[in-house]
Image (tube, rainbow, N blue to C red):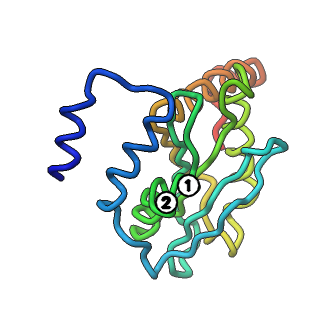
Amino acid sequence: MEAVFAKIAEETSKFELGDEEKWRKLYEPFYPKPPSNVTVIRDQRYGPFERNMLDVFVPNGDDLAKPVVMYVHGGGFFSGDKMWTEKVYSNIGWFFAQHGIITVVVNHRLVPHVQYPGGADDMQLAREWIYNHISSAIYGHGSVDKVVLFGHSSGGAHIAMNLYSASKKYSQCLEPTQGFVSM
């Protein structure tokens, strides 16, 4: 960790596009190795765009109606990837799957190739993919009634924008007592 602390002390006042690669490599040795009790299904297409891909981390076991986490990476809207390395962001899938939670790690379109509400639209497509596929045996029998949306930085912003726009889009179709549409 001393190398990490030294780098932080040296570079705390600036951050340029591309610096994320330097920081990722610095932290790489601290991530755990892939566990043997999790199956990973990579690069499942959830939408029409090149980056509309997701990975599913499936815990061992035949339990039905497992809970699901959908994780969306950050990157300031212009960088990031669901699998920057074999470990970065896969570590989130492995962690939750080792605790019996199916984890879906999602890519999304990046600026300048997308503008609002494209990120929110990507989240809607990913949520619909989960709703339509996660209960199947190959993806671990996940429950569409037990899905948590989890995003880091711009990934969280995309989720929030999706929930906001979805509530506006569908709220006129609901009775006032029904609340928001959930998937």
Q: Nearer the viewer, residue 61 or 48?
A: 48
Position in image of residue 65 (x %, y %)? 58, 66
Please indicate, yes or no, whether residue 75 appears anywhere in the rendered image.
Answer: yes
Please rate how many residues cluster around mark 2, counting C-alpha atoms within 10 Å: few if below 14, some from 14 to 19, many from 20: many
| Label at residue 90 | 2
Position in image of residue 28 (x %, y %)? 37, 57
- What SS does tag 1 mark? loop
Q: CA distance from mark 1 to mark 2?
A: 6 Å
Q: Quadrant of the C terminus?
A: top right
Q: Nearer the viewer, residue 55 or 131?
A: 55
Q: Nearer the viewer, residue 126 or 40?
A: 40
Q: Residue furthest left?
A: 2
Task: State the residue at coordinates (51%, 47%).
Answer: 148
Task: State the residue at coordinates (62%, 59%).
Answer: 55
Q: Are marks 1 and 2 in contact (CB under 8 Å)?
A: yes
| Label at residue 122 | none
Task: State the residue at coordinates (68%, 65%).
Answer: 135
Name which of mark 1 and mark 2 comes first in the sequence: 1
Residue under numbered circle 1: 83
Q: Nearer the viewer, residue 48 or 124?
A: 48
Position in image of residue 14 (x %, y %)? 34, 22
Q: Is residue 116 left or right of residue 49?
A: left
The kind of residue on which mark 1 rests is Met
